[in-house]
Image: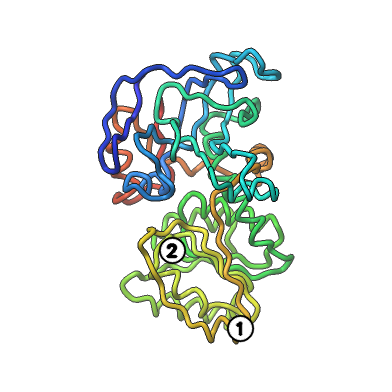
Amino acid sequence: MKAVLYESPLTFSVKNVQNPVIKSQQVLIKVKTCGVCRTDIHIHHGEFIAGFPLVPGHEFVGEVVQVGENVKGITIGDRVACDNTVLCGHCYYCKRNEPLYCENFYSLGVNGPGGFSEYVVVNHDKVFQIRNLSYDQAVFAEPTACAVHGLDVIDVKPGDDVLMFGTGPTGIILAQLLKNAGAGNVVVSASDSKKLALVKELAADHVVQMERSNYSKHEQEINNLFPKGFDIVIDATGAKEVIQHLPQFCKNGAKVVIYGVAAQKDTIQLSPYEIFQKELKIIGSFAQTHCFDRALKFIENGVVSTQKLITHRYSLDEFERALYQVETGKGHIKVVIDI
């Protein structure tokens, strides 16, 4: 089969590799579409628990073409979305029923073979039928699942004022979930005016254009809108320059949420006195487990609208172009690989 294969960070090719073989409790998926995520950029550079050699791609959907002998409830021809997480079940954290912290966390497309390939093997318990969704909708199941986990850890209260920086696809999805969860005001700040217009249409009560060359402009506008600050302040950019300014927008007792993926080498400066004096809560939101069922419900029911999110499509042979678009290009929201 054809696949993207990394031999090491930064070194990949699109080539023919051996077809995968399923075990008795696995299924073989013919991949139809796989999303390209900012996390794939971190993986490209050898970050984010990446393991090599690697076939990347963790946001994949497709058709079941082979079923293991002990698999029930899944048949050849089923259209499916696949949860890429595989948990050991026996480590310290798994035994504490905290599977997201699994010490042997295995993730298809991150440290195991993923969906930038013609076929991928998935454990039967991680396969979800998508009868009522198109592949273009269902390819957002994994990013929506990550946003669902974000919603869980944020624990928004009815009427909370929320400020979020960033308008990537998972940020736009999270904004929709926050509004549906009862946030009183959702304010989104980012530099791209077209993305701001879309998030305003879908979820945001206010949008503020970010001035990357002069932070004081958007900071002043945000402060004028909400002089008392916000109950929840979220970074969905992964940019350290944005993250270290989050506390200044917080009410006393607020939550600061690191939702975007920063580079592993990045550091920030925060005032411990400000955290102490305001009693701020600093929260991380890492990936997801066991959130796919809710994610698919939100997409099926229209709570999460994905209709306008795909902006760029490439073939598997064009993987390098797709990666370049996500890392350095402009004007995209979601980039996908059709296989």
Q: Amino acid at mark 2?
A: Ala
Q: In terms of depth relative to the viewer, which is nearer, 96 or 273?
A: 96
Quarter of the figure with the N terminus: top left
Q: Residue at x 54, y 65 (%)?
A: 234
Front residue of 63/73: it is 73
Task: Point out residue 94 in the picture as x, y percentages from the top left corner.
Answer: 65, 46
Q: Position of residue 243 (x, y in %)?
A: 45, 69
Mark 2 vs 1: CB contact within 8 A: no
Find numbered disc 1 in the image and state the secondary structure of the residue it sits on: helix
229, above or below 103, in the image = below
Quarter of image, res 25: top right
The residue singled out by tag 1 in the image is 278
Residue found at x 45% / y 75%: 245
Residue 1 shown left or right of residue 243 in the figure: left
172 relative to 338 in the view: left or right: right
Q: Is residue 256 above or below residue 315?
A: below
Q: Is residue 295 visible?
A: no
Tell me which residue sits at (47%, 37%) in the image: 58
The residue singled out by tag 2 in the image is 190
Count the marks: how many?
Answer: 2
Q: Vertical placement of 61 versus 43: above or below?
A: above
Q: Earlier in the sequence, mark 2 or mark 1?
A: 2
Query: Residue 89, relative to residue 221: is it above or below?
Result: above
Q: Give SS at disc 2.
A: strand
Please state which of residues 253 and 227 is positioned toward the viewer in this rendering.
253
